[in-house]
Amino acid sequence: MAIETPDNEDSPRRGLGRLGRDVAMVLWPSFLAAAVETMVFFAVFDPVYLGEGTALAELIANHNAGYALGFFFFWAFSILASALTVYLVRTEAPR
């Protein structure tokens, strides 16, 4: 037995709304992409070795700090890419 909800304009809307959906469409795929990028990148490169002789040497003195910094770096770029995609999909060309 299915519960039907009215589709009229008087019923209160539930959910995130357009902005909430857009934020979710940006953050979740970018998080997953950053996770994969981090795994692939750090399977090849050691974060402590990459930081030697740089200003980041003290910041990434251990592996976990390097992995976290790398993840947030990849996540930031993935957010930019996803946000650009949402912006381009939502923006209509003038007719």
Image (tube, helix red, strand yellow):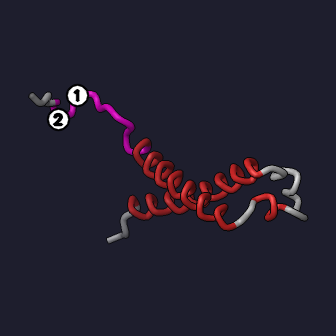
Label 2 close to label 1 by CB (< 8 Å): yes
Give the label on residue 7, or none.
2
Q: Residues within 10 Å of mark 1 (few under 14, many from 20)?
A: few
Label of residue 11 in the image: 1
Residue 45 position, x and y percent, is: 71, 66
Residue 24 position in % (x across, y down): 45, 46
Classify residue 42 by image quadrant.
bottom right
At a point 90% along the width and 64% down the height, the residue shown is 53
Residues drawn in magenta: 5-19
Q: Reply above or below: 32 against 37.
A: above
Q: Is residue 8 magenta?
A: yes
Q: Amino acid at mark 1?
A: Ser
Disc 1, SS: loop
Residue 52, position in %: x, y?
A: 87, 63
**Image quarter of residue 79:** bottom right
Main secondary-structure element of the magenta-colored stretch: loop
Q: Is residue 72 found inside the magenta-colored segment of the image? A: no
Q: Secondary structure at mark 2?
A: loop
User: Residue 91's image quarter?
Assistant: bottom left
The residue depicted at 39 percent of the width and 37 percent of the height is 16
